[in-house]
Image: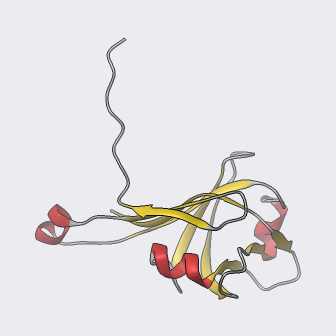
Amino acid sequence: MLGGKIHRATVTTANLEYEGSLTLDEDLLDAAGLAGDAVDIWDITNGSRLTAYALAGPRSSGVVCVNGAAAHHVHIGDLVIIANFASLGDSEARSWRSRTVFVDSENRMMDRRPERLPIASSV
């Protein structure tokens, strides 16, 4: 199940020389429940899909820094979705609500709520 997600964050830094990971504003990490976890990074701008692990950056900094080899695929200014997944038993899964964090263009949290399913439309 989707555990947590930061939706449409803006990449602020890319650091090829770091050993590898994703550095995120600690406020966003906490709000989405991603601290220390393996995360998927889905680049909205160019379609790249990567896996990394989340490290805490300075609180209230808005930092979204892609480190190591992943910096070849995600660039400063790209919009990304950052997500993790949770393994749950049947009873826990039935009441589970993911934590989706919505940010503005400076990666400041605007809203936090469970993800809403799209409404099917008839064409």
Quarter of the figure that contains the C terminus? top left
Comparing 83 with 117, the one in front is 117
Q: State the image coordinates of residue 39 (x, y, percent, origin top left).
A: 55, 71
Q: 9 left or right of 114?
A: right
Residue at the spot 38% in from the left edge and 54% down from the top edge: 115
Give the residue furthest to the left: 91
In the rendered image, which quarter is residue 25 located in?
Answer: bottom right
Q: 84 left or right of 10?
A: left
In the rendered image, which quarter is residue 117 located in?
Answer: top left
Residue at the spot 80% in from the left edge and 71% down from the top edge: 69
| Total numbered badges shown on the rendered structure | 0
In the rendered image, which quarter is residue 23 located in?
Answer: bottom right
Q: State the image coordinates of residue 101 (x, y, percent, origin top left).
A: 50, 64
Q: 72 left or right of 36?
A: right
Comparing 111 with 50, the one in front is 111
Residue at the spot 72% in from the left edge and 80% down from the top edge: 61
Give the residue furthest to the top: 123
Quarter of the figure that contains the N terminus? bottom left
Residue at the spot 52% in from the left edge and 84% down from the top edge: 35
Comparing 17 with 25, the one in front is 25
Give the residue furthest to the right: 17
Q: State the image coordinates of residue 84 (x, y, percent, origin top left).
A: 47, 69
Report the coloring of the rendering.
secondary structure
